[in-house]
Image (tube, rainbow, N blue to C red):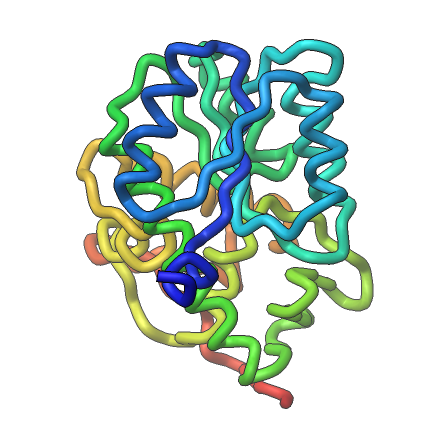
Amino acid sequence: KGLLRAAAKQILLVEDDGDIASLLRLHLEDEGYVITHEVDGAKALLLLEQAQWDAVILDLMLPHVDGLEICRRIRQLTRYLPIIIISARSSETDRITGLETGADDYLAKPFSVQELIARIKALFRRQQAMGQAQTNGQICAHGLALDPLLRSVHLNGKEVVLTPREFELLYFFARHPGEVFSRLALLEQVWGYQHEGYEHTVNTHINRLRIKIEKDAAEPEIIRTVWGKGYKFAELTYDAAV
């Protein structure tokens, strides 16, 4: 049991609603995760400094320090730490703000506990895949330099700021130059779950990626649309460096 306990994922749950926190803790512990719950934003920041966490589940409206500020602080850390935001703020603008601030995923309340669990599992699967990909080193193509260890992207020597999901999407494309992926396939490979209702999310992320890396987002040369089939990362001038 000690070995199993040591291998269990340590999750910091930052939520000031006691009923929601108790429910989530019950279900997450049933899944084998070790949950530490904190209601106060300032105290959560102290906990982040005091221990090594595997993920953070983060409400936005918290006492003393709000969730977005905590998210910003986490992204300033050297070590990458996955973040899932859970919030009553459900508008598209709130969701985009959360993701742009550095969250890996965003669930609007009320949500299904089982969906949260599915997204946590998908998040850990993606993290494991990214860890395995790190052995392949940087990828350089079309003026882009992608570093999976630092999760950094440079375009012609200039840093490009991407959200965690944008990076994972771009890195996935770059690892499979010339291959065509449907939106559902990208959801399964990059998001880790496959729901037809989320297909528009893929379009949104690709559009935002194009704005950040293409010379002309309206005439993309790197992430190309294959009409009726999906998207592909252009294979021309592709090169991988270890």
Question: In the rendered view, does 120 fall on the left or right side of 61?
Answer: left
Residue lying at the far right of the rendered structure = 157
Query: Which quadrant does the N terminus fall into?
Result: bottom left
Q: Determine whether 43 is above or below 240 in the image.
A: above
Residue in view at x 41 percent, y 57 percent: 5
Task: Measuring from the top left, give residue 193's x and y in whole percent.
Answer: 26, 47
How many callouts does the rendering have? 0
Task: Measuring from the top left, give residue 156's x and y in whole percent.
Answer: 77, 67
Q: Determine whether 130 is above or below 225 in the image.
A: below
Given residues 94 and 1, the one toward you in this image is 1
Q: Is residue 217 visible?
A: no
Residue in view at x 42 percent, y 68 percent: 129
Quarter of the image where one finds residue 179: bottom left
Q: Determine whether 34 is above or below 138 in the image.
A: above
Given residues 99 and 112, the one toward you in this image is 112
Residue lying at the far bottom of the rendered structure = 242
Residue in view at x 40 percent, y 75 percent: 176
